[in-house]
């Protein structure tokens, strides 16, 4: 793996058929799925909260959020625990496949989909062998208003 | 009084340092081209809090300087003055000077008089540049006067080794001012040299310069008066030029440098003055002089002019003995300062490191939280072990089972003691207030009696620290705006002494702290008018409750003029902000003519909670045990509906609203009728209601964890906890249920 100044490591995970890449420095750990405690009146993609070594951590399901694939929860379901600006959040994905280094120059700008797809959280697209990786700014996504994970977002939604 | 308050000085110093640190970091992080108004507000609040605390504890020098600073910051924050890099520089320097002042008060460090003067004049220049003369900073001129003093005569007594290079020494001393040699004599091994120096520098500066060339026990500096002025009460009227040049007027900064200068002689007395006690009163060396000169009977308003010493003013001359003691202590402090100055001549502004370390340690709260988390995990592990061991044959595994029992006891004890680290009684907060109230009442000319209720209520340590500021604001507010003047009270047929009550108690899952006064109550019309003036959004027909909440909006103040008692409208929005940041809320109850109650409600975020585990739709929830009055399985006759929808339960003679927990949390209950489930009678505030759950699962002490750390506030839930099996259970917010009922 080559390290030059603008190469950063990314964690690749899958949602349905799509492959996504996020900055690995935001990832705290990867763990198996355990049923969370449901939170009343939370949106469907917030599955609930779990006990992560004494901390209460909310678990989101990105498959539900983006309506990709059929969410099923079994022993192979994976939760990526993210550490975003001091807050710990879990995200359920279909699978974690790889850690790769991406240089900025191979990342291409996201095409404009008009109103059909919200690309605000997508940094760009990158080719990887036969696949296409979707680079996501996970911090922007998770702390964004529509994830309803943060207090002021909730207040404005209420 | 002095003694009572001094135990809080440490807290104030620490707070002041924290405020100064955030003041500095905020200033440094400020984007000058587009300053964030939130940051400007925070900077302003830091200054404001220091001023408030300093005023409370009588550190008038701090209060005065911060006051000017605050005036400027207020203008910056309101946008009537643009912030420039130069201003940031001056503000930062002011921060340094304030830190120095704090060090002076705490450790008797050397006051940076030159720095104070520079900063003060710089701030004033800024204020004048803004085209406004500071209306309430008369004390400023005291400093300015020191900038152009006439040369003072000093007597310098040196004790030198005979081998010392006297000529070189004299040459270096000549830099300080005109030097005349008065006498030279040998005494034993030493050469005694008496010099006269005419210098523009203050005694403090001179001694500082001298400390670089000579050990402090080898020289002695006195101001030279042709005739020692006899101490006289009312000498405040002395022209400032004569006093200021010697630094007497600055007495406050180091419990009087002049005094320090002179008292210095006490410790290394000249042979003629070994009996310092006797000579103290009437010689130049007397450390009595500065104290009486402060004019014990000066009017209260004068302290701004003669700069401080509030407490000394209160001291009657009859207490001369006490003053002597005090003077001695101050002299000792001055001596200590000398010693430390010598040790760290280069960095004399550093505070002495060995001070302020009492039997307590200050530990980062996150460390305690971490400890608490580990203990929480230990508890879970322990209960897992106990669960797996419960299936074993007790006869075959006696020792294992005994060990598990022991582990359980140890774990519980450990948990309790870790918990108790964080819990401290409310009295630590309340006990500051008798003095605050007394001083404020005196200042405002009102008669107020303070009553403290529920001082033993335990509160999380983290809250206690954060509560002081808001509570001080509320108390000041009640005294200033709430309780009327004696005449008004008499005219209204009330007892002339106003009653201010500070009460703390636990209510359900909350700690409630109330500031009650029997004053005039809030004035609806005035609040509305003021809100309109400030452009706050107003709805027609607002309820009183909504109107009262307006006073918590930023920039709202009903006080017609800015006083140093209750600020300029930052108070209340800071109060609300601070309390919300703790996950709490503020409410106001007010009745015109009868008084008002400010109620702070804090959740037990990091407290232990005795909880009742209840099941609803297969999920587990926790109800605070202290809110539960009774649980029962109702019969069909007890359950009624109102309008076909609202349910009530009849318990004895009362119809209580029946809330279904499964409807609150949105799950499918196992029991289709209340008669199949359990109904808990719960109480919140003065409201009773019934809660329908599926089943009771048991009773357990739980560690309350807040959901906001990684998530956000969940409506209807006050927090979460981790159960014995490691799962998370949510804690029902009973007061939120009550609002729903």
Image: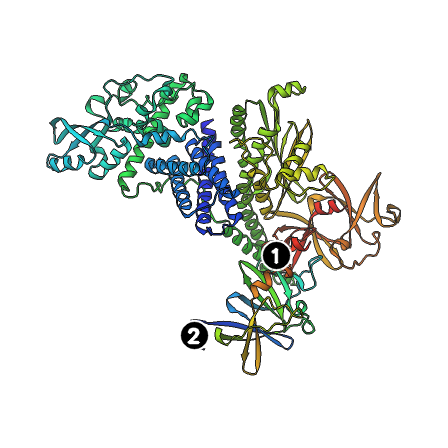
| Front one among B367 and B294 | B294
For the residues labelled 2 and 1, the Cα–Cα distance comes to 35 Å
Q: Chain of mark 1?
A: A
Question: Are the residues under marks 2 and 1 on the same chain?
Answer: yes
Q: Residues within 10 Å of mark 1 (few under 14, many from 20)?
A: many
- The percent coordinates of residue B263 (x first, y second) are 29, 27
Q: Residue furthest bottom?
A: A130
| Front one among B356 and B399 | B356
Vertical arrangement, residue A77 with respect to residue B224, above or below: below
Q: Residue furthest front?
A: B131
Q: Secondary structure at mark 2?
A: loop
Instruction: Give the labeled residue for mark 1.
Output: A150
Q: Quadrant of residue B538?
A: top right
- The percent coordinates of residue A20 (x first, y second) are 58, 73
| Front one among B382 and B682 | B682
Instruction: Give the labeled residue for mark 2.
Output: A3
B118 left or right, relative to B483: left
Q: Residues within 10 Å of mark 2 (few under 14, many from 20)?
A: few
- The percent coordinates of residue B139 (x first, y second) are 41, 29
| Front one among B57 and A104 | A104
Count of labels in the image: 2
Q: Chain of mark 2?
A: A
B722 left or right, relative to B133: right
Vertical arrangement, residue B541 with respect to residue B186, above or below: below
Q: Secondary structure at mark 1?
A: loop
Residue A103 visible to an observer of this rendering? no
Q: Give the residue at x 34% y 20%.
A: B238
Residue A11 visible to an observer of this rendering? yes
Q: Earlier in the sequence, mark 2 or mark 1?
A: 2
- The percent coordinates of residue B520 (x first, y second) are 65, 27
Vertical arrangement, residue A33 with respect to residue B468, above or below: below
């Amino acid at each position: 793996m080559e390290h030059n100044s603008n190469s950063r490591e990314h964690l690749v995970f899958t949602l349905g058929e799509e492959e996504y890449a996020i900055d690995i420095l935001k990832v705290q750990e990867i763990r198996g799925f355990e049923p969370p405690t449901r939170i009343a009146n939370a949106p469907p993609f917030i599955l609930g909260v779990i006990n992560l070594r004494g901390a209460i951590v909310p678990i989101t399901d990105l498959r539900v959020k983006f309506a990709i694939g059929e969410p099923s929860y079994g022993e192979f379901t994976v939760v990526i625990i993210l550490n975003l600006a001091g807050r710990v959040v879990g995200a359920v994905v279909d699978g974690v496949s790889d850690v790769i280094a991406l240089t900025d120059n191979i990342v291409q700008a996201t095409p404009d989909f008009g109103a059909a797809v919200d690309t605000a959280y997508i940094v760009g697209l990158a080719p990887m062998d036969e696949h296409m990786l979707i680079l996501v700014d996970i911090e922007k996504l998770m702390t964004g208003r529509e994830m309803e994970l943060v207090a002021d977002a909730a207040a404005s939604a209420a | 009084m002095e003694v009572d308050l001094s135990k809080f000085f440490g807290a104030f110093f620490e707070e002041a340092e924290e405020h100064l640190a955030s003041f500095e970091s905020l200033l440094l992080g400020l984007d000058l081209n587009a300053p964030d108004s939130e940051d400007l507000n925070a900077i302003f609040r830091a200054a404001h809090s220091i001023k408030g605390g300093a005023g409370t504890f009588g550190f008038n020098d701090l209060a005065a300087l911060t006051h000017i600073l605050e005036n400027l910051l207020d203008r910056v924050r309101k946008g009537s003055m643009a912030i420039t890099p130069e201003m940031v520089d001056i503000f930062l320097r002011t921060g340094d000077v304030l830190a120095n002042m704090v060090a002076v008060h705490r450790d008797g460090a050397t006051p940076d008089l030159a720095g104070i003067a520079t900063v003060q004049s710089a701030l004033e220049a800024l204020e004048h540049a803004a085209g406004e003369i500071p209306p309430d900073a008369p004390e400023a001129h005291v400093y300015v006067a020191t900038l152009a003093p006439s040369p003072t005569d000093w007597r310098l007594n040196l004790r030198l080794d005979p081998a010392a290079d006297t000529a070189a020494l004299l040459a270096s001393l000549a830099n300080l001012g005109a030097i005349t040699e008065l006498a030279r004599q040998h005494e034993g091994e030493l050469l005694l040299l008496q010099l006269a120096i005419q210098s523009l520098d203050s005694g403090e500066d001179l001694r500082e310069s001298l400390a670089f060339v000579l050990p402090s026990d080898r020289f002695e500096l006195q101001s030279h008066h042709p005739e020692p002025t006899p101490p006289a009460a009312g000498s405040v009227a002395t022209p400032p030029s004569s006093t200021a040049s010697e630094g007497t007027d600055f007495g406050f900064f180091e419990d009087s440098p002049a005094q320090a200068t002179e008292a210095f002689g006490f410790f290394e007395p000249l042979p003629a003055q070994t009996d310092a006690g006797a000579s103290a009163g009437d010689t130049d060396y007397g450390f009595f002089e500065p104290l009486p000169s402060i004019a014990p009977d000066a009017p209260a308003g004068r302290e701004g002019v003669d700069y401080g010493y509030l407490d000394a003013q209160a001291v009657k001359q009859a207490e001369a003995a006490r003053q002597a003691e005090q003077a001695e202590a101050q002299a000792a402090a001055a001596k200590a300062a000398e010693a430390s100055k010598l040790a760290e001549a280069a960095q004399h502004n550093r505070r002495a490191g060995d001070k302020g370390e009492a039997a307590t340690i200050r530990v980062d709260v996150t460390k305690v939280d971490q400890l608490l988390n580990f203990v929480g995990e230990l508890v879970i592990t322990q209960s897992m072990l106990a669960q797996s061991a419960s299936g074993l044959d007790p006869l075959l595994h006696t020792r294992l089972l005994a060990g598990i029992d022991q582990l359980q006891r140890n774990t519980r004890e450990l948990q309790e003691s870790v918990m108790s680290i964080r819990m401290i009684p409310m009295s630590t907060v309340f006990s500051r207030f008798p003095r605050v109230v007394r001083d404020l009442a005196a200042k405002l000319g009102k008669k107020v009696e303070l009553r403290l209720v529920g001082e033993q209520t335990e509160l999380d340590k983290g809250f206690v620290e954060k509560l002081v500021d808001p509570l001080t604001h509320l108390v000041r507010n009640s005294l200033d705006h709430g309780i009327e003047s004696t005449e008004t009270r008499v005219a209204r047929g009330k007892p002339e002494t106003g009653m201010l009550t500070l009460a703390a108690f636990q209510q359900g899952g909350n700690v409630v702290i109330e500031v009650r006064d029997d004053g005039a109550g809030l004035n609806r019309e005035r609040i509305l008018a003021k809100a309109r003036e400030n452009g706050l959004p107003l709805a027609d027909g607002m309820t009183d409750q909504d109107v009262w909440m307006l006073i918590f909006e930023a920039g709202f103040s009903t006080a017609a003029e800015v006083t140093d008692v209750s600020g300029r409208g930052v108070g209340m929005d800071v109060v609300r902000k601070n309390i919300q940041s703790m996950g709490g809320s503020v409410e106001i109850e007010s009745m015109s003519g009868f008084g008002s109650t400010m109620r702070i409600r804090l959740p037990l975020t990091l407290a232990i909670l005795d909880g009742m585990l209840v099941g609803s739709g297969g999920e587990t929830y926790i109800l605070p045990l202290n809110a539960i009055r009774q649980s029962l399985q109702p019969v069909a006759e007890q359950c009624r509906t109102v309008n076909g929808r609202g349910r009530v339960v009849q318990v004895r003679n009362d119809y209580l609203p029946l809330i279904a927990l499964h409807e609150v949390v949105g799950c499918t209950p196992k029991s289709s009728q209340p008669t199949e489930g359990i109904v808990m009678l719960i109480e919140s505030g003065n409201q009773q209601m019934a809660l329908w759950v599926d089943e009771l699962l048991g009773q357990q002490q739980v560690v309350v964890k807040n959901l906001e750390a990684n998530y956000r506030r969940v409506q209807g839930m006050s927090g979460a906890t981790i159960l014995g099996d490691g799962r998370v259970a949510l804690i029902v917010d009973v007061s939120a249920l009550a609002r729903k009922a």
